[in-house]
Image (cartoon, rainbow, N blue to C red):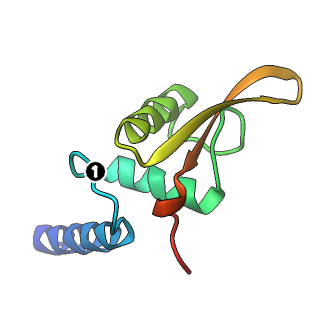
Amino acid sequence: MTAKQKVRKYTQHTKLFEKKLKGVTPVKKLGTTQQSVFEELQRSGGWYEGCGWNWDTNSNTTRIMESLVKRGLVTKTVSKQGLFPWVVVYTAKKETQNEE
């Protein structure tokens, strides 16, 4: 793939993602990693440490999720689940869910 094709593919991906976020105006544009994590969060329905997927490491995923919380795209809640006394759960906000 040539550099020109990579730029074109990246631009198309960014435009499609911005369409998905219509009605939500982030402070800054999301980076490619943030976009990918956010899309996976929407597909999976939520994320918490040990849920079965992460982006490289749990701490890296948490850092990315916190950046999405600051942008208003993700909700952070603390819930009691199973053996663990407190679990932090991240979910995509309803207005950002994909309409299919």
In the image, taking residue 31 as reference, residue 68 lies left or right, namely: right
The image shows residue 92, relative to residue 96, as above or below, that is: above
User: Residue drawn 88% across and 30% down?
Assistant: 82
Count of numbered marks: 1
User: Residue drawn 11% across and 72% down?
Assistant: 4
Which image quarter is the N terminus in?
Answer: bottom left
Residue furthest to the bottom: 100
Q: Secondary structure at mark 1?
A: loop
Q: Amino acid at mark 1?
A: Pro
For this rendering, which residue is in front, 38 or 98?
A: 98
User: Residue drawn 19% across and 70% down?
Assistant: 11
Q: Quadrant of residue 25?
A: bottom left
Q: Position of residue 21 (x, y in %)?
A: 36, 65
Q: Position of residue 33 (x, y in %)?
A: 36, 48
Q: Quadrant of residue 50?
A: top right
User: Residue drawn 34% across and 59% down?
Assistant: 24
Residue furthest to the right: 83
For this rendering, which residue is in front, 53 or 70?
A: 70
Q: Position of residue 23 (x, y in %)?
A: 34, 66
In the image, taking residue 76 as reference, residue 80 lies left or right, namely: right
Q: Position of residue 40 (x, y in %)?
A: 53, 56
Determine which residue is flagged by label 1. Answer: 26
User: Badge 1: how crowded within 10 Å, few (<14), some, or many (20+)?
Assistant: few
The image shows residue 35, relative to residue 78, as above or below, that is: below
In the image, taking residue 61 as reference, residue 17 lies left or right, namely: left
Residue furthest to the left: 4
The image shows residue 73, relative to residue 49, as above or below, that is: below
Which image quarter is the C terminus in?
Answer: bottom right
